[in-house]
Image (tube, helix red, strand yellow):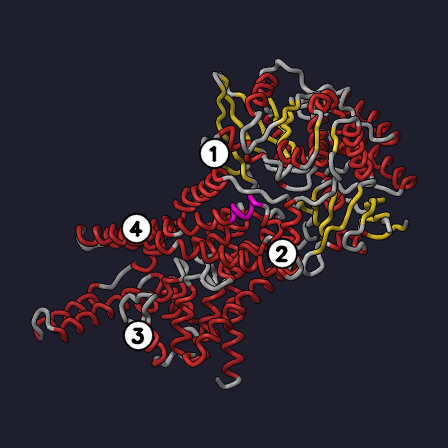
């Protein structure tokens, strides 16, 4: 039998996800709606021999086309025609929640209302006459407590009946909301036109189309015009007449009139004894008392700093051990391959390309899990909305949103973060342009892999003022990121700020189950989607730095040199080993210089001399695209010092300090370039995933490299003129 | 009774919305969130930098920026 589809619709914070988790447990699948970054969550539901697919629609306040979420929800309802829609409604916030219900009723879809958080409502001294509410709305209304599972059986029994067609869908006569004489008149005419011509028939009810046209809903008007341009123009004329009339007589917009009447309709129902308040409606609850402290003018920001700092600490210190564990396992596997395979390209590819690549992907997993766990706590408890509330004024100046702060901190706003979880943290942002600007600028922050580079170059060239320079570069990364965000918002991401109007939901204790599901599904997405691409790029980068290798004649020179040393010293002689090691290092250096990456590095000198970089630095920068740590190890190879451990690069520092191609000015210019040029490709892959297109990922590489080049060239050239 | 813009309301001041003078996305969003003519609101507080503002509306809390509050006219109680 074909499985029936059930959809969950409701306001954000109404408990939709909790209900979804309760219904489907771990049998969930998270994907994306085509072309947008909105998550599509599906799960299997079983009740006796009744099976259904449950789709968790994105949380929306309305079905206008305000946001991607609303468009997705509306299209789903219209195109996929679920057998039943369960509209989850927050009993403690009934009036606002019923606003969406009204619109679902007008869509005439089979609807069951789940009145959630009955416990909270009764704590607040509210009594709701469920039976009468159901009678007035013309659909079944079932009281539930999604967190504890109370009432779910009855709810699902009603949903099943509705889905199987044993209950009748909403009665249009009952839910015909009057929008006032003027609008109603126009609606009558328009509905008749739409019905006569069969406009978008079977997709939307005719009166609903008319309402949306008067509301000036652009997405729908476009759909109408595609179906019949002629009728579309005719209908818009009608709508314009009402609009002009309303503006003249009442000095107001048609969409305002429609919203006012919808709320009027709800108020009318609730007034008929549906809801009784035992206490003053606006009295302060525990949650509001907590807010008096947590959003207090003085205490609020301090507590917020403490909370953000501890998330940062938890994410990065608790992950040290598991990350080291993952690295150790892959190191062990690498060692195994190293020991058991004969020398050759296959071994080199397995060790450096495959194992290094997969290890690189999985190495981030503990970080990402911990970060998502912390974010899930902040999100589910309601604190994240407060952070946005407090930080918005600052971030808005740069065209961002209050919620952006989280992504910046995790990426390395406090030096030592990581842009991969930072990029993924932008999911909590609901405004598309602000989100994109955040996504593209968080990689400028000082991530953990940039810190050793800072330590190396500062240690080698600015040893007297290490702390000062470290701190200075952290501040500089903030400045560059925020200014870049502003520039993006003035150019490619130009546009009005997304309205901030949002809810501060009451504080709630997150459920353990919810946290686990949240954390796991996001982590799994990272492993699955990012993993394959990252492996491919990792092999590609390996090949670029290995091939074509040395010519036989050049190779012979090194072999000869080794033989010469072998004849001079006995096996195991210390001086002899040292000399042999040096030959190895020189050979590695020669291979690197002759590789594709090396040739590109040499070729790039034509441009990079402007910033003071020679070919060795260029190769290291190319390698840094694999991961910023690689910059140091590649520099080591390029300077024929063997692969250098980023944690212990003292000798490389000395070598650079003594090299004639380097000076404090070059070091400064190089540091600036290394901090701000293209993000590592794991980040780039994640940006592509989060932005929903590779174009943005390529854009990210190009624009950040351009910014880095301009800044470092500026510093280098001005520095030279000033005589540094 | 006097009518002022929401931006100018003081903390803990109460009033009734008389008009929302904005169309388009912002207007839609404001109305979807329940800020419609006839709604009683109380200013609950402001963010540390005075912007955005938090409102008490029907027992729940909403926030909006000052430049968004400019479009909302409120008849305030003294």
Residue at left offset 45%, top offset 67%: A674
Q: Nearer the viewer, mark 4 or mark 2?
A: 2
Q: Residue A625: within the magenta?
A: no
Q: Chain of mark 2?
A: A
Residue denoted by label 3: A651
- Find residue B33 and report its horizontal and vertical position in percent: 72, 41
Looking at the image, tell me whether mark 1 or mark 3 is earlier in sequence order.
Answer: 1
Q: Nearer the viewer, residue B60 or A29?
A: B60
The CA distance from mark 1 to mark 3 is 51 Å
Which range is magenta? A375-381
- For the residues beneath circles 2 and 3, the answer to whether they share a chain is yes
The CA distance from mark 2 to mark 3 is 43 Å
Residue denoted by label 1: A29
Residue denoted by label 4: A355
Left or right: where does residue A190 sit relative to residue A418? right
Residue at left offset 20%, top offset 70%: A581
Residue denoted by label 2: A400
Looking at the image, tell me whether mark 1 or mark 4 is earlier in sequence order.
Answer: 1
- Find residue A539 and report its horizontal and vertical position in percent: 34, 52
Secondary-structure class at tag 3? helix
Secondary-structure class at tag 1? strand
Magenta residues, dominant SS class: helix
When asked about the image quadrant of residue A459, the answer is bottom left
């Amino acid at each position: 039998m074909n499985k029936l589809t059930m959809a969950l619709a409701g306001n954000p914070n109404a408990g939709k996800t909790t209900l979804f988790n309760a219904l489907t447990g771990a049998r969930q699948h998270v994907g994306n709606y085509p072309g947008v970054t909105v998550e599509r969550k599906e799960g299997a539901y079983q009740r006796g021999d009744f099976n259904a697919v449950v789709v968790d629609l994105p949380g929306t306040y309305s079905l206008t086309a305000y946001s991607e979420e609303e468009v997705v929800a509306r299209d789903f309802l219209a195109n996929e025609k679920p057998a039943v829609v369960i509209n989850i409604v927050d009993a403690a916030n009934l009036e606002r929640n019923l606003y969406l219900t009204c619109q679902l009723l007008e869509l005439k879809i089979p609807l069951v209302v789940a009145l959630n958080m009955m416990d909270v409502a009764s704590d607040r001294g509210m009594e709701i006459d469920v039976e009468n509410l159901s009678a007035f709305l013309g659909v079944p209304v079932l009281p539930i407590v999604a967190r504890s599972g109370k009432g779910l059986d009855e709810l699902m029994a009603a949903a099943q009946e509705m889905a199987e067609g044993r209950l009748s869908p909403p009665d249009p006569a009952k839910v015909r909301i009057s929008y006032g004489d003027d609008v109603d008149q126009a609606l009558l005419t328009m509905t008749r036109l739409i019905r006569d011509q069969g406009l978008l028939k079977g997709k939307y009810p005719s009166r609903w189309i008319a309402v949306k046209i008067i509301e000036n809903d652009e997405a729908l008007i476009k759909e109408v015009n595609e179906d019949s341009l002629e009728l579309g123009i005719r209908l818009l004329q009608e709508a314009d007449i009402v609009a002009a009339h309303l503006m003249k007589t009442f000095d107001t917009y048609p969409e305002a009139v429609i919203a006012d009447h919808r709320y009027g309709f709800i108020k009318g129902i609730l007034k008929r004894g549906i809801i009784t308040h035992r206490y003053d409606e606006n009295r302060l609850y525990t949650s509001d008392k907590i807010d008096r402290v947590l959003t207090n003018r003085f205490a609020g920001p301090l507590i917020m700093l403490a909370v953000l700092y501890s998330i940062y600490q938890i994410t990065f210190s608790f992950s040290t051990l598991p990350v080291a564990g993952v690295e150790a396992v892959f190191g062990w596997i690498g060692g195994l391959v190293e020991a058991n395979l004969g020398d050759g390209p296959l071994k080199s590819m397995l060790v450096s390309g495959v194992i290094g690549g997969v290890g690189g992907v999985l190495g981030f997993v503990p970080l990402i899990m911990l970060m998502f766990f912390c974010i899930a706590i902040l999100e589910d408890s309601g604190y994240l909305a407060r952070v946005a509330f407090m930080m918005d004024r600052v971030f808005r100046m740069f065209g961002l949103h209050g919620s952006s702060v989280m992504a910046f901190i995790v990426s390395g706003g406090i030096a030592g973060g990581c842009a991969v979880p930072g990029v993924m943290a932008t999911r909590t942002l609901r405004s598309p342009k602000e989100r994109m600007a955040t996504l593209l600028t968080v990689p400028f922050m000082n991530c953990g892999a940039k810190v050793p580079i800072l330590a190396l170059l500062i240690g080698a060239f600015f040893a007297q003022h290490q702390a000062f320079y470290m701190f200075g570069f952290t501040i500089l990364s903030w400045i560059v990121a925020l200014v870049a965000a502003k520039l993006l918002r003035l150019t490619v991401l130009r546009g009005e700020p997304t309205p901030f109007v949002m809810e501060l939901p009451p504080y709630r204790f997150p459920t353990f189950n919810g946290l686990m599901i949240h954390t796991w599904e996001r982590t799994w997405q990272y492993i699955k989607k990012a993993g394959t691409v990252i492996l491919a790029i990792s092999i590609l980068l390996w090949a670029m730095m290995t091939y074509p290798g040395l010519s036989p004649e050049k190779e012979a020179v090194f072999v000869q040199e080794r033989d010469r040393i072998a004849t001079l010293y006995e096996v195991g002689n210390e001086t002899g080993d040292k000399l042999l090691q040096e030959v190895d290092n020189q050979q590695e250096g020669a291979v690197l210089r002759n590789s594709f990456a090396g040739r590109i590095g040499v070729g790039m000198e034509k441009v990079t001399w402007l910033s003071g970089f020679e070919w060795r630095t260029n190769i290291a920068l190319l390698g840094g695209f694999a991961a910023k740590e690689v910059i140091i190890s590649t520099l080591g190879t390029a300077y024929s010092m063997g692969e250098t451990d980023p944690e212990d690069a003292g000798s490389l520092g000395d070598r650079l300090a003594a090299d004639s191609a380097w000076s404090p000015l070059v070091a400064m210019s190089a540091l600036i370039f290394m901090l701000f040029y293209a993000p590592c490709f794991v980040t780039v892959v994640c940006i592509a995933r989060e932005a929903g297109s590779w174009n943005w990922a390529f854009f990210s590489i190009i624009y950040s490299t351009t910014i880095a080049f301009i800044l470092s060239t500026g510093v280098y050239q001005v520095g030279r003129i000033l005589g540094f | 009774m006097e009518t002022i813009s929401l931006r100018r309301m003081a903390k803990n001041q109460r009033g009734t919305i008389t008009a929302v003078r904005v169309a388009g996305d912002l207007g839609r969003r404001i109305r979807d969130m329940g800020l419609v003519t006839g709604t009683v609101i109380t200013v609950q507080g402001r963010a540390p930098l005075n912007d955005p503002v938090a409102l008490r509306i029907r027992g729940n809390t909403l926030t909006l920026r000052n430049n968004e509050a400019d479009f909302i006219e409120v008849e305030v109680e003294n």
